Image (cartoon, rainbow, N blue to C red):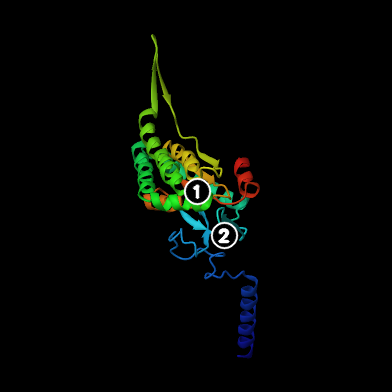
Amino acid sequence: SLIIIQKLISTLDTMAEQAQKEEKVDNSDPAKSVPKGYRIKDINNDDTVQYVYNFINGEYCVPSSGEYIDNVNPATNQVISRIASSNKEDIDYAVASAEAAFEAWSATDVSKRAEYVQKISQLIKSRLEEFAILESRDNGKPKIMAQMVDIPAAARQFSDSAEYAKFVETDALVKDDSLHYLQRPPLGVVGGISPWNYPLLLISGKIAPAIMYGNCTILKPSELTPMTAYLLTDVIIESGLPAGVVNIVQGYGKDAGSPLVKHP
């Protein structure tokens, strides 16, 4: 019995040592773990500093670095969010997710892809006020400009892409002695980096045509204006777009943008 007790003590000691070695994740700390069931809400509340996570494979996730970048309202210099400071590890994960989604998405009928893309357009329009206020707070431009120009134009990127692609997926070139068919097959995974001046419009202009033609995407918004791209992820979830088709990774150009454009 003494031997059994000694073995039990030894086992418990080993388990305790392993537990000490394992990194403990504080699930109550939003910087270390995305809260269970998390969805974006109350994003225009000036009394709350939002955590802006990466959106990869249809889910929100913390940056592998565990670090965040303060994002300020340029009109007040108030910190309104802390955005994920991503690196090559996050980009690799996003690429793997997009590649995994590509086979099924590229095989999806163009009319079905158009339904998803049109749904995104409609959802942006239905949340025009929310997007316009957020664009103004994040970018510094007057709300009326975002409301009349930026956000409607972003919605049109999706609706126009959905309509156009349905009619030009294939073309026929007729000559006197021959008939030629021109096809536009999906290419694969498309990466894009968006600037700060028209944040939602320019990132939408990269996403919409790419996914409409059957590609999957990885986008990095400007670290100066990440907020409407982040709110767009909530629209993407609501649209039902399959996971991995659109991935949005936050961070600096040198840390996240560079590995994105250099990725093989």
109, above or below 171, in the image = below
18 shown above or below 104: below
Whether residue 76 sits left or right of residue 115 in the image: it is: right
- State left or right for residue 74 relative to residue 182: right
Q: Name the residue nearer the viewer: 100 or 201.
A: 201
Q: Residue furthest bottom?
A: 1
Can see residue 104? yes
Which residue does the image show at 65% across and 47% down from the upper left? 254
Residue 13 placement: quadrant: bottom right
Q: Nearer the viewer, residue 101 or 235?
A: 235
Dot 2, crowdedness within 10 Å: few (<14), some or many (≥20)?
some
Q: Position of residue 77 (x, y in %)?
A: 58, 57
**Residue 182 sits in quarter:** top left
Q: Earlier in the sequence, mark 1 or mark 2?
A: 2
Instruction: Specify the amino acid type for callout 2.
Output: Val
Q: Which residue is mark 2?
A: 79
Q: Quadrant of the N terminus?
A: bottom right
Residue 18 spot, x, y in % from top left: 63, 73
Read off the residue under disc 1: 247
Residue located at (36% from left, 34% from top): 163
Q: How many marks?
A: 2
Q: Position of residue 107 (x, y in %)?
A: 40, 39
In the rendered image, residue 197, in percent from the top left (x then y), is placed at: 54, 43
